[in-house]
Amino acid sequence: MNLHLPQWLPQSNTVNLLAGLFLLSALYAAGQRRVVACIAGYRWNSIALGLIALTVALVTGTRHIAFAALLVMGVKAIVIPGLLAKHASRMKGRDVEPLIGIPAGMLICGALVVVAFSQTRALFGSGQNILGSCLPISVATTLVGLFLMVSRRQALLQVVGLVLVENAIFLAAVSLTYGMPLVVEMGVLLDLLVGVALLGLFVGRIEELQGDSDTTRLSSLKG
Amino acid sequence: MLLLLSLVLLPLLAAGICLALGGRAGTTRVTLISLAAMLTLALVLAARVLAGGDLQAAGGWLHADGLSVLVACIITGVALPCAAYGADYMRHVQQQDHADARWAPGRYEALTLALIACMMLSALADNLGLLWIAIEGSTLTSALLVGYYRRPGSVEAGWKYLILCSVGISLALFATVLLFYSGAAVFGEQGSTLRWTTLREVAAQLDPRFVKLAFLFALVGYGTKAGLAPMHSWLPDAYSQAPTPAAALMSTALLATSLAALLRFHAIAVAGVGPDWSGALLTGFGVLSIVVAVPFMLVQGEYKRLLAYSSLEHTGLVALAVGLGTPLALFAGLLHLLVQSLVKTLAFLVGGSLLRASGSRRMDHYAGLIDADPRLGTLVVVAGLGLAGLPPLGTFVSEWMTLAGGFASRHAGAAIVALIALALVFIALAYHFSHIVLGRAREGFVDALPGRTRVPMAMLAVGAILLGVWLPTPVRDLIEHAMRSIRP
């Protein structure tokens, strides 16, 4: 298991392609009006993340990264989207208008991506071959996920934004360090899984109380 | 070391037993016995660390230094009175408003114990990844406590708490990744480590840009969890909606663990790029938290929300003191973390008794308490004096030392702003507490909880007063030990 890595990875086209899929699926999620479509975007995002980790595992030949990659795919591409979709299918209320319209939102997301790329380059330098373009893409996806959280009213969409941010940080961990120690990654995944289940519980209660899951109407506590 | 492991596993075991017992009698006994055992273990741990230096366990995953032990003592020291009071409190809630508390019996105790296990794990973790997992675990368990009652306010508060702290904590995960990455430059690709003791040793060799960036993300991430302004918007809602004993636990023990997590990153930044950079940030956020709390305290109508903003102010004071970084201020900050835990727990618990007796959260429904119930009134007075930082309470000593340390440091301006804000806080607290204690008593005020709930409150009051007039040598040694965890 003792590996000597050549100058990190070569600018692998596979990784770049998958990183592109990662960013595009996040943008797709941010541009959808319907909750189910947003969840599909997240699912593709997770698949891309898992495949990137798997590629890293294949190139470096490390078994624990491959194991972590499969775990990530299982939890993030199957279990969590499944949980979210179950809640989405139970949703009674109609789709609520976003706080910022979709076209304007897409323009903002584009700007966020540009900012992420320029600022990450400025900070980490472009000379480093940190899995090609993964780091700026992870920063861009973090921003897109946060934008999704603040621009939508439905509770479930805010959860999708949150798990997108979480994916982006996983990508950063993979691209910067080839992933954290396995025990830590498993603990983080467990926390994420329980967290999404709890958020789903609260989404259910919000709907039970006010008939839809418009979080802007949650404003009884003030001062 | 079995000692460290048992501190983490004992509450988990007790939580499992409480779940298994369900509605049957005995959950209270299991909770109290396990928490009493934990307090004993924490004190034994303190004695051993003071006598023989840091302890390690579980193959280097757990580590007890001065700061861990201080936090462990705060957690267990607060959890026991909260649980002793909480048993009667929750029974009363269940009898009176069962529509609100539809959870299965035994669930409350199990959740509290699981929260305590997570907090204890975060205090003892020697691995930034494990620390993150434990802090996130404490968010998840405490979110269920915030949303414990099934009424609109609780659901709203629980949702806000969970979503805000989850975003915050994912930024803290990024901070962890950054430090791991910067360690790779020192140890080589496969040898990097998340152990903060090792990272602190090699901090001078880490790339300062990443150390700074990691501290920034940790400040926002764990700062959200600790409730530093401007990331505190979940805090008044969560503290006012959670069941009172759980709110007391959150505003003291959980606050101490989140701050301690942030201080681990601070310690690495101090060792890596010098004390001034991260210290200045902590000072700034600390002063901001104190100042932001003032207007909300002045016009506050609800007792528990008043305490929540007071909590914001006290968090700010600790951050300010640690940020100032002079030995006096650092000592004062850690002492404040300890005494404010006693005072705030007392304040929350008397608030619980007022709430159950009057059925209202609003302070204008409480009046003339010193006539209606002199003993409870006295406890309220002690709590009020403590929150305001007046003698003879321990908070007076720690706040005074913080300000003295501040005036002697390079950030005297911050200390002056804090002093003015503290004076305004005093006015707010004097106004609200004099209305609760003095004036014409409401007719028919009867404490709805049994007399034995006064015992934990009285013990907290005595402890807070004792620390104000006399600082025992072991306590002083413990705090000096904890100072070395931040600045060796």
Image (cartoon, coloured by chain):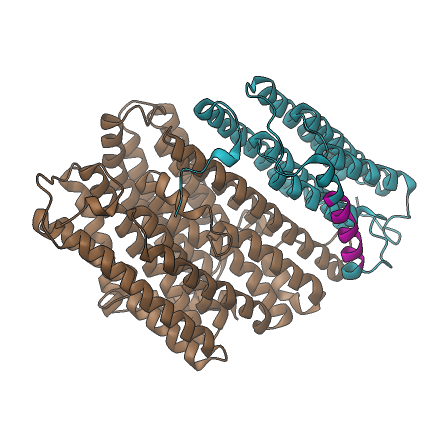
Chain colours: A cyan, B brown
Q: Is residue A46 visible?
A: yes
* Location of residue B226 in the rendering, given as x and y in whole percent from the top left corner: 47, 53
The image quarter containing residue B391 is bottom left
**Is B31 rendered above or below residue B3?**
above
Residue shown at 36% from the left, 73% from the top:
B401
Q: Is residue A129 left or right of residue B194?
A: right
* Location of residue A85 in the rendering, given as x and y in whole percent from the top left corner: 63, 22
**Is A39 rendered above or below residue A127?**
above
Nearer to us in this view, A68 or B136 = B136
Q: What main secondary structure does the magenta stretch of the protein show? A: helix
Q: Is residue B39 visible?
A: no
Residue shown at 91% from the left, 48% from the top:
A10
Q: Is residue B55 left or right of residue A50?
A: left
* Location of residue B20 in the rendering, given as x and y in whole percent from the top left corner: 38, 24
Nearer to us in this view, B454 or B45 = B454
* Location of residue B341 in the rendering, given as x and y in whole percent from the top left corner: 34, 55
Q: Is residue B351 left or right of residue A26?
A: left
The image quarter containing residue B116 is top left
**Is B326 rendered above or below residue B453?**
below
Per the rendered image, the range of residues in magenta is A108-121
Nearer to us in this view, B441 or B272 = B441
Please count the marks in the image: 0
Q: Is residue B475 magenta?
A: no
**Is B173 rendered above or below residue B268?**
above
Q: Is residue A50 left or right of residue B138?
A: right
